Image: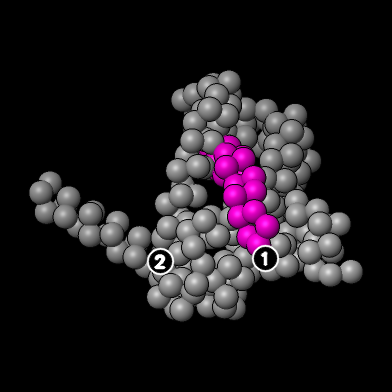
Amino acid sequence: MDMETAVKSLNPWVSIWTKPRETIRWIVDTDPTRHVILLAALTGIAQSLNRAANRNMGDSLTVLALLGIAVFIGPIGGVISIHIMGALLRWSGSLLGGQATSEEVRAAIAWSSVPIIWALLLWIPEYALFRKELFTSATPRIDANPLLALLLLGFALIETIIAIWALVVLMQCVGEVHGFSAWKASGATLILALLVGGVVFACAFGLSLFS
């Protein structure tokens, strides 16, 4: 069985977890636009929900409003983000000798988000258990119930592991499309992070001078 047949038989939605390089190579060789917009939109929903929980947005908004933002605004943010990140990671990778196009890097970013997208399923039992307290700073029900607190910690641990693995997959996928190692892909990502951090610092410093 050749590599292409093997990857097709595994299904990219599953094989990307354990065979990221083989999977993304098959995708960019056959159709680098495959499901990229769908994956970016779903990732945008996941990021929107996580942002709402981490920032306690339920203190000022209803759950329905938060879901509306996640479902309707999240995908827009996800699509915009993948185009920006695709261009920037193509550029930072090229500084280290990478050969990928922006389209190929977008595919790498999109497909490396599959673990994050699968993690969306965790929101179903989480909301059934914790309700609006997922999004609020005050958590009286959880605080009064040790089992709920333990379950919340368990979900947080699972989500952290998934996020770390998604980062590992991202480095593997970006490295594959650029034609270098995952360590070099980490370097390209670090260059990008330093650039963005420098721009943010410069803007903040500039604003402070005029405040």
| Residue 166 on image: x %, y % | 65, 59
Whichever of callouts 2 and 1 sits on the residue coming sooner in the sequence is 1
Left/right placement of residue 208 relative to residue 73 reads left
* Residue type highlighted by circle 2: Trp
Residue 24 in sight from this viewpoint: no
Other-residue count near label 2 (Cα within 10 Å), few / some / many at <14 / 14–19 / ≥20: many
Q: Return the residue at label 1.
A: 25
| Residue 105 on image: x %, y % | 53, 60
Q: Return the residue at label 2.
A: 91
Q: Secondary structure at mark 2?
A: helix
| Residue 208 on image: x %, y % | 16, 52
Other-residue count near label 1 (Cα within 10 Å), few / some / many at <14 / 14–19 / ≥20: many
Placement of 61 over or under 38, stated as above or below:
above
Camera-side residue of 73 and 106? 106
Foreground mark, 2 or 1, reads 1
Count of labels shown? 2
Residue 36: say if magenta.
Answer: yes
Write down the region rendered in magenta.
Answer: 28-48
Placement of 84 over or under 133, stated as above or below:
below
Camera-side residue of 40 and 71? 40
Camera-side residue of 166 and 159? 166
Q: CA distance from mark 2 to mark 1?
A: 20 Å
Left/right placement of residue 3 relative to residue 210 reads right
Q: Which mark is residue 44?
A: none
Which residue: 23% across, 54% down? 204
